[in-house]
């Protein structure tokens, strides 16, 4: 199963991080609009990512809900009928909820740097160090930690869990947007 080392953080200074990501990647990034629908599963997470253009991906992943760099194992398959698949999976499994975001993707070496504007939550950044077959977790963590420094991301801004978790927590606390 492919894997990556991930971190996620609240964005305190969007212009600075965007500028640093552009410098490090040598690009203006690619804008991707996504709607993720999460489904009820006994272990891990299952989501259907709709790219809002008639294409999508069904993604299963397992990762610990801890702050800082963490290893995530995942499986992905493409679909040309994301809305139909959402309906079937909702009927079969039930939905946990949906996350809508606009993502700007920058590639820095083997790392996907995401600058995300998440509906109902705000701005975040995410690093995904896409692990090569011969690399171990420690190498991925080292790359993630160095990129955190290069991008000006502080330890206290790191978050655990997924955007879906944050949205659900806000709903439970009466902060639904």
Image (cartoon, rainbow, N blue to C red):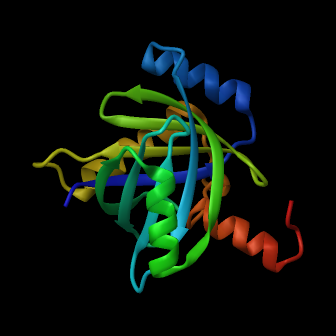
Q: Along the line of sight, which residue is nearer the eye, 84 or 116? A: 84
Query: Which residue is pictured at 72% across the width and 32% down the height?
Result: 14
Q: Residue at 51% of width from left, 53% of height from top?
A: 83
Near-viewer residue (28 or 25): 28
Instruction: Tell me: 63 left or right of 133.
Output: right
Q: Quadrant of the C terminus?
A: bottom right
Residue appearing at x 80%, y 73% in the figure: 171
The image quarter containing residue 89 is bottom left
Q: Is residue 175 above or below residue 107?
A: below
Residue 159 appears left or right of 74: right
Q: In this rendering, does residue 70 appear at all?
A: yes
Q: Residue furthest bottom?
A: 42
Figure quadrant of residue 166: bottom right
Taking the image as drawn, is residue 66 in sight?
no
Viewer-proximal residue, 44 or 80?
Answer: 80
Where residue 21 sits in the image (x, y, percent)? 53, 25
Provide residue 18's location: percent of width, then percent of height: 63, 25
Location of residue 70 in the rendering, given as x and y in whole percent from the top left corner? 40, 62
Where residue 113 sits: x, y (%)? 48, 36
In the image: residue 174, left or right of residue 47: right
Position of residue 12 relative to residue 171, above or below, is above
Quarter of the figure that contains the N terminus? bottom left
């Amino acid at each position: 199963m492919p894997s990556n080392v991930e971190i996620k953080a609240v964005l305190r200074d969007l212009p600075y991080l965007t500028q640093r990501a552009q410098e490090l990647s040598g690009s203006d990034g690619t804008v991707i609009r996504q709607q993720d629908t999460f489904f009820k599963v006994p272990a891990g997470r299952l989501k259907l990512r709709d790219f809002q253009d008639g294409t999508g991906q069904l993604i299963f992943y397992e990762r610990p809900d801890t702050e800082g760099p963490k290893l995530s194992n995942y499986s992905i398959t493409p679909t040309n009928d994301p809305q139909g698949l959402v309906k079937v999976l909702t009927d079969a499994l039930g939905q946990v909820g949906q996350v809508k975001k606009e993502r700007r993707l920058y590639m820095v070496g083997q790392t996907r740097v995401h600058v995300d504007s998440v509906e109902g939550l705000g701005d975040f950044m995410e690093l995904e160090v896409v692990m090569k077959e011969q690399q171990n977790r420690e190498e991925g963590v080292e790359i993630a930690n160095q990129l955190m420094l290069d991008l000006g991301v502080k330890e206290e801004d790191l978050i655990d869990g997924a955007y879906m978790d944050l949205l659900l927590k806000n709903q439970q606390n009466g902060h639904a947007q």
